[in-house]
Image: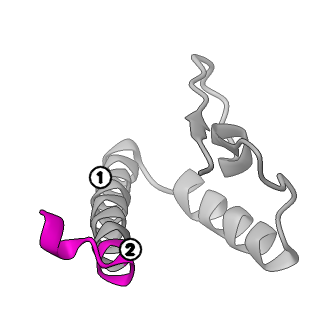
């Protein structure tokens, strides 16, 4: 399983997503489509005020929690582990 490290910085400079998140044991190079999406999102966030950026961060975190729960449920179902809980 890949482990994700979140890098925290104290400077005010905007950080790119690849700087914030590094996946250990994986290929750190993004596809062209991923690079485009990251830069597009970065541009959108830089144009937001602090309140807007905090709001989108909370929404993204909520989506991550739901996504993780969905993956766990699907894996339990696929591996036949649902009846054990």
**How would you rate the neighbour count of disc 1 (Cα within 10 Å): few for under 14, some for 14-19, many for 20 or more?**
few
Nearer the observer: mark 1 or 2; the answer is: 2
Q: How many marks?
A: 2
**Position of residue 43 measured from the top left corner of the image (x, y, whole percent):** 65, 61
Query: On the picture, is 40 further left or further right than 50?
Result: right
Query: On the picture, is 66 further left or further right than 79?
Result: left
- Residue under the image location 26 percent in, 71 percent down: 81
In which quarter of the view is residue 82 placed?
A: bottom left
Q: Main secondary structure of the magenta part?
A: helix
- Residue under the image location 60 percent in, 25 percent down: 12
Q: Is residue 74 magenta?
A: no
Mark nearer the N terminus (1 vs 2): 1
- Labelled pair 1, 2 in contact (Cβ < 8 Å): no
Residue, disc 2: 75
**Position of residue 52 measured from the top left corner of the image (x, y, whole percent):** 35, 54
- Residue under the image location 83 percent in, 52 percent down: 28
Which residues are drawn in magenta?
A: 75-85
**Nearer the observer, 17 or 2:** 2
What label sits on residue 58 in the rendered view?
Answer: 1
Q: Residue furthest bottom?
A: 78
């Amino acid at each position: 399983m890949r482990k994700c490290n979140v890098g925290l910085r104290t400077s005010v400079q905007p950080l790119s997503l690849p700087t914030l998140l590094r996946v250990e044991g994986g290929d750190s190079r993004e596809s062209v489509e991923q690079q485009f999406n990251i830069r597009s999102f970065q541009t959108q966030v830089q144009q937001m005020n602090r309140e807007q950026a905090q709001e989108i961060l909370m929404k993204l975190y909520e989506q991550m929690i739901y996504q993780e729960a969905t993956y766990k449920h699907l894996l339990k179902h696929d591996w036949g582990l649902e009846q054990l809980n």
